[in-house]
Image: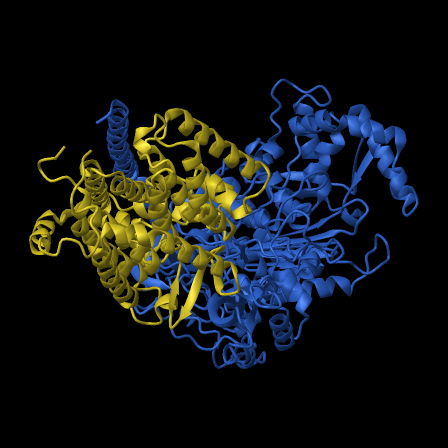
Amino acid sequence: MTLNPAVNKGPAAMPVAETRRRSSRLRRFDWVLPGTALALSVYGAVLVWSATRGRTSLTGGDPQFFLKRHLMNLVIGLVLMAGTSVLSYAWVRACAPVFSVLSLFGLLAVLTPLGTTINGAHSWIVLGGGFSIQPAEFAKVAVVLGLAVVLTLKSSTGVLSEHVAEAVPPRRIAAAAVVAGVPTGIIMLLPDLGSAMVIMVATAGLLVFAGTSGKWLALLGVGAATAAVAATQLHLLAQHQVNRFAAFADPHLDPQGVGYNTAQARLAIGSGGVLGKGLFNGTQTNGRYVPEQQTDFVFTVAGEELGFVGGVVLIALFAVLLLRGIAIARQCDDLFGMLVCAGVVSWFAFETFENIGMTLGIMPVAGIPLPFVSYGGSSMFASFIAIGLVENVRLRATRPAVTLD
Amino acid sequence: MTSAQSRLADRRRTRLMVLRVLVLALLATLVGRLWYLQVRTGQTFRDAAAANDVRTVVTPAVRGDILDDQGRPLVDNRSALTLSVDRNTLLGGRDHGAATLARLASVLGTTPQAISDQIRTCAPNIPKPCWNGSPLQPIPVARNVSVQQALAVSEQHDLFPGVLAGPDTIRRFPAPYSLNAAHILGYLSPATEKELGAAAAKGEVMQRSDLVGRAGLEATYDSYLRGKPGVTQVAVDIVGHAQSTVADTAPVDGDHLVTSIDARIQAITEKELAAAVARARSQTSPTNGKPYVADSAAAVVLEARTGRVVAMASTPTYDPNVWTGGISQADYAALTGESAGTPLLSRAYQGQFAPGSTFKAVTTAAMLQDGFGTGTYDCSPSFSYGGQSFTNFEGEAFGPISLKRAIEVSCDTVFYRVAFDMWQRDGGMKPVAHPAEPIATMAHAFGLGARTGIDLPGEAAGDIQDRAEKQATWNKMHGIWCKRAKDGYPELAGPDPERAKYLQAIAKENCVDGNQYKPGDAVISAIGQGGDLVTPLQLARVYAAIANGGSLMQPQIGRALVSPDGKLVKDLAPIVTRKLPVSGSTLGFLKDALHGTAVEGTAAPAFAGWPQNVIPAYAKTGTAEVYGKQTTSCFVAFAGTETGPRYVVAMMVSQGGTGVGTSGPSVGNILKALFGVDMGKPDPNGTLPTALPAIRPDGLLPALPPATTLPTPPPPPAPGTGDSGGSGTSQQTAASPPSAKKPTT
């Protein structure tokens, strides 16, 4: 059994070795991951700035309003990331249930009159002073953490799950279903289909990387597909959600609503060409033709003003981020850390593909932000907390060069 | 490590590898799709984006003026205030604009319903009025509003959301000398779907709200008058606020059309036509003992050598201002209504009348070219053939007379016999393979039965009956005729049983042998009756050809197109349609005979006091009999020396009495005005300018004395002090007292 000594020690353990460990941790600190996240956030800040310079109805006359807010969110996010990355494993595991419960309360609070409806989704809690939080974003972190904990719990027999033939027994799958299902259900009620989808994808990723057998995965897949078909057939989804799904393939289905969004998004991106129209020179952007351009459709700014080159740079940054996350997961020698990384990578990968894909017209429109790039504090905080968790795993759970047996 | 553990670790590692491949594949998909959108099909998106965010603001070009021969505007523009409604803003209001509509209605003195009717979008099931333009475009609801009305709206913008007050140019008819000229000038109406498509195909800018020349000179010269609107392309944001100017082309104002119409002569012609109609109505018709109806009439004044139209009047007419700012349904019905005499129709070139004896000039040309001599003919009271008798007008008889005299006194029987001879020579009832038909052939050579090609749309062709046409008509109509012969005219039997009976008899006759060109047809055609119909313009053109030495001219009103800065854009030179197939001696004889008619023939009363020795006049009268109607009064005359201008004046009054009695005095007066005789200063050079009016480079028209009232003739003994009409060339060189009469015979 391979164990990193740093992993299982509590916060107060081994004071003598503290200095050495710290220096070794710093050496092991992965600069690429937060560096990429920072680059994406700064890139996003510029895009958000360009998208909102002329939207006086939103900015209240200050063209840099959103730029400042985005940068402020970035700073807070960096602090959260730093804080998360230095917590010990024990703390992280200990925090997970608390965090899950808190996020559930947050989600339930949205359902109460405290919540505010924006774009058909009842997802926000307005804090006053121009601040509001979107608990669903934090729920993503909570679910990833919660599932990682649940899937790595010692079984009641005291035997680690690895010892039994079935890597993830049905009972554990059921527990995971509860941990992920409850917040997902509440989020669906908001309704915030996008966040629910992210959580479901992250859950699937965690189950897959926990080693769930193909048989169970197939069963879960069939179950999910059946549920999705049933949901549409039984009209459990709101009409605007169905329209959003249908309109990406056929914008004429809903020309004034989602079809308009996707058509305008494609127009903005398509007209950008290879090198783009130049920052702040996008006619579609300056004309405010693309709705929600600073949040869900932020990629259209890059597409129009910075062109194919700018778009590819953005996608490449995500490639670096995601591949780095996968690399950390692979280097990780304890299951909890690996699952946290895999969950975060699944989450970001899905958000990236879905968000950019919807602006390019190959994915249905859903209210999903582009991590780090889209304007939005909750998303920014949650994303940086996630990066902090991965960094935490990197610092504590990855193998040193030589493994002990 | 157990094997199970190891298997599980392998499984996880494999799955992470799969995740890595999956992530790369998904991101590669995004890059591929991005390449497809931006590089592969980018151009279509760039085009679409341009259409999306570039608005075209059209600055209308100022429409060119229509000027008379001296540069006096007959049509120009004036600015007016227009109230328009932006439908989206108005209807987007809390109460769907109800309160705003009510306020607007009270400002305009109309009902909210009337305004909302105006701005509703046209659809098959929606009655007029409705808006057939783009719903995004402000809809004009009141053109030409008062300043107070415009201010009421623009100063209380919050009370009138979506209502815009703005300047607009509308067509104005300055009407020098209070002339009308409605039929010549024409009118504008909004562009049709077809015109919009045609303009788009040619790459021209035309908007739905643009007005297009629909009739008259406005239609013919529309492409010159219209100019090119300026186009400013502005990049706009999603709510339509301008961001930047992409392209900007200034409007090019339309060219001015200089016409050969002389405002003074046009006004006099209209006045004289009205006088002729009044004269007719004051007389009693011998045919039915009632006053002449004079339901319609027209007069045309041509310059004989160029074919240019100096004046053209038609009655009934209408006020051209009814078109300004859009015509109402009621007004349009009145213009086209049968009961009002269809005033929209210009009798001068769209009205067809029997020419009567004015046609004898053509008959004479035909017989002289056909070998008939100018010697002695028998002017008996009647000519009979096969039991049918054709009489002279009012049964007159002059015995054996010369052909010249036969024209002067308008003896019908002389021409009956000639036409009968010709008919017989063509084989009579059994026509030869290629009948010569000299009279019909000559009529066609004189441009009758065909459009003259005048620069006005919708011209009537008239009709000249010949053997081939009779056959063709019968082929087409005999089914209907035979049915009528059997069934009669039950719809007429009630109100007019006599007419019904007559028509049935005609139908019977036509059914049996309506294809045959009978002697009666031939005989009556010689004196311009029967089936022959001409427009007053055609008649004037025939005499212009005689007057100018044998050139059949294509009548023209447009003289030149001049750019707003005074440059000649296009000179509309006279057009010769053809040389008449008539010898010089025939023309000489005709002129001699027509002069005799004016001096000592049927037309002489119209030329009392005319200075024949200074300016010889030539004329022919005509009084055409039309079945079931009163006689058509025809009078055509020309005057002028060999070197000076020659003007032809033709006048026709339907159900108007005799040619000389009704039309003669008016034609005489028009000629007098043309040559200054009315002012006591006869001038062989005429009173009209020959050069184009000068338009200054700054676009200003020549300064002219006010043309408000027509100059009044001086009291008979003392010559007048001046011609306030402002003719530049009227100072005569050799004034002669208008006393000498009958210089030659």
Question: In the rendered image, which quarter contains the C terminus of chain B?
Answer: bottom right
Please report the residue visible at 66 percent of the width from the left and 69 percent of the height from the top: B112
Front-most of residues B162 and A338 = A338
Q: Position of residue B87 (x, y in %)?
A: 55, 62
In percent of width and height, residue A280 lies at 24, 58
Report the colour scheme: by chain
Pick whichever, B386 or A212, lies toward us: A212
Residue A136 falls left or right of residue B382: left
> Which residue sits at x=62%, y=34%?
B439
State the image quarter where residue B275 is shown: bottom right
- Whether residue B643 can be seen here: no
x and y percentages locating residue B90 in the rendered image: 56, 66
Q: Position of residue B152 (x, y in %)?
A: 55, 80
Q: Vertical placement of B385 versus B100: above or below?
A: above
Rendered yellow, the chain in question is A
User: Which chain corresponds to the colour blue?
Assistant: B
In this rendered view, identify the residue nearer to me: B443 or B10.
Answer: B10
Count of marks, rendered view: 0
The vertical placement of B424 against A361, above or below, is above
- Left or right of B333 on screen, residue B673: left
Residue A89 visible (yes or no): yes
Q: Name the residue furthest front.
A: A157
